[in-house]
Amino acid sequence: MLEIDWQDGDTTSLAHCQLRLGCRCAECVALRRRGENLVAPVDIEVTDIAPYGSNALHLTFSDGHCRGIFPFEYLRKLADR
Ligand SMILES: [Zn+2]
């Protein structure tokens, strides 16, 4: 799980698999547009987390996928689904 503690005291927990499936990079968005389902192994892991600008994270996954930019706002929404 990826846990984020927000400044307002809230905490968000996201499974790495959930993050991978929620990736919004051009490649993944194109797949969804074609109606293809994204697949991710349940044991997929986030292998690297880097800040991207001041309001997003750049995540790298154990399947080698490293194009996902996750705005904090989106991460919060993803957890509520
Ligand atoms: Zn992607």
Image: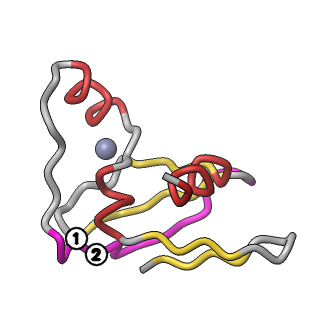
The residue identified by callout 1 is: 62
Question: Picture quarter containing residue 40?
Answer: bottom left
The x, y position of residue 63, in whole percent, is: 17, 64
- Indicate whether 7 appears above or below 76: below
Q: Which residue is painted at 31% across and 57% down in the image? A: 20
The circle on residue 45 is 2
- Does ligand 1 reach within 8 Å of label 1's beta carbon? no
Towards the viewer: 24 or 66: 24
Amino acid type, residue under disc 1 in the picture: Ser
The x, y position of residue 79, in whole percent, is: 53, 60
Callout count = 2
Which residue is outermost to the top?
34
State the SS at label 2: loop
Question: Picture quarter containing residue 34?
Answer: top left
Q: Which residue is painted at 18% across and 43% down in the image? A: 38
User: How far apart are the two marked residues, 1 and 2, measured between alpha carbons?
Assistant: 5 Å
Quadrant placement of the N terminus: bottom left
Image: magenta residue range: 42-54
Residues at badges 1 and 2 in contact (C-beta under 8 Å)?
yes
Which residue is outermost to the front?
81
State the SS at label 1: loop
